[in-house]
Amino acid sequence: SWDDIVNGTGNSMYSGTVTVGSTLSGGSYLLKDTVGNYTTDLNGATTGTGTQFTDADDIWGSGTISSRQTAAVDAQYGAEMTFDYYKNVQGRNGIWDNGTGARSRVHYGNAYNNAFWDGTQMTYGDGANNAKPLTSIDVAAHEMSHGVTENTAGLVYRGDAGGLNESTSDIFGTAVEWYANSSADPGDYLIGEKIDINGNGTPLRYMDKPSKDGRSQDCWTSSTKNLDPHYSSGPLNHWFYLASEGSGAKTINGVSYNSPTCNGSTVAGAGRDAAAKIWYRTLATKLTSRSDYKAAREGAIASAKELYGTGSAQCVAVQSAFAAIAVPA
Ligand code: ASN
Ligand code: ZN
Ligand code: CA
């Protein structure tokens, strides 16, 4: 016998009706795609690999938490879109750059309000406040991108490097959300806006002005290194917004942004596709485990020159956006 790889239909929680990879095996379908991204049910456990999701008719989930498959649809879809993004946009063949997919585990623990990468797999809780699983595409791509960072620059999770690590996950979480471009969750520069993680409807993070979360920095300082990585990520998230969209006020897909600069300058954006390509090249070819914001600035400028040429608009945008987050030359 052989496995017949087909495409199932998923009723997701956050991205509408989606296509998910499925594999016909022994008379039922597995939630597993051609490269081996697959999703399992932890059913409240906090250890183990979980039980592979299977289905008789290859139509998965209901769009609400009433079906245990729904969170699995979002996690699987997020992993597949992230895999496709890295392959098709960045030329990277998965987390390990060897063409293999990864496992996603859903329904971790009880009312667990987080998600994580542990070195081998992605894991998602069901959420605490309004029971919204942590499986939106930006969060899934954020977690999977921790795997990419671990296997490229290897940025440690402390000091400036910790902030660069966290921001890298927010940058590609956002880039994948734009890439997937679903009408139910169009691209934005917010992290976790679909998940009511704070219980009051606000997103987890804001890239245009990171300090809107009450803790992240907008501007790099000599004490950035002392913050938790989820707050020292602020300056690089701000850089990505500025390098993509430029400074000032703007409304995109119905979301209003207002990104100030730290030095009073006006920044012209180079577009998010260029900014994401420049940042991926920086991550994969310029940074090492203890790189700081100064190294990020130098690496990104070098990457922009290699990709677009010295004096290109993209290179100017990178330089002016790093000046605008107060990283000194
Ligand atoms: N969801 C968090 C993150 O990926 C988990 C953590 O604190 N590391 O950043
Ligand atoms: Zn993270
Ligand atoms: Ca988002």
Image (spheres, grey):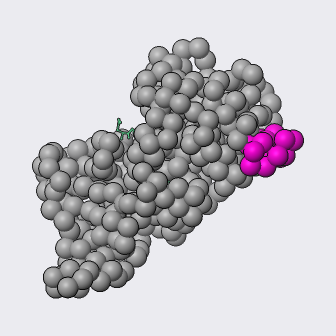
Q: Is residue 143 above or below residue 300?
A: below
Residue 284: image location, x then y, percent: 56, 42
Is 272 placed left or right of 152 in the picture?
Answer: right
Q: Which residue is drawn at 40% across and 76% down?
A: 19
Main SS of the magenta part reads helix
Is residue 310 part of the magenta span, yes or no?
yes
Q: Is residue 13 visible?
A: no
Q: Residue 80, located in which quarter of the rendered image?
A: bottom left
Is 315 placed left or right of 81 in the picture?
Answer: right
Q: Residue 27, located in which quarter of the rendered image?
A: bottom left
Q: Give the range drawn in magenta.
A: 304-317
Q: Is residue 81 visible?
A: yes
Q: Which residue lies furthest to the right in this view?
A: 311
Work out whether residue 142 or residue 6 is closer to the camera in this orientation and state it: 6
Residue 200: image location, x then y, percent: 38, 44
Q: Residue at x 62, y 35 (%)?
A: 286
Name the quadrant where ligand 1 sits: top left
Is residue 147 part of the magenta span, yes or no?
no
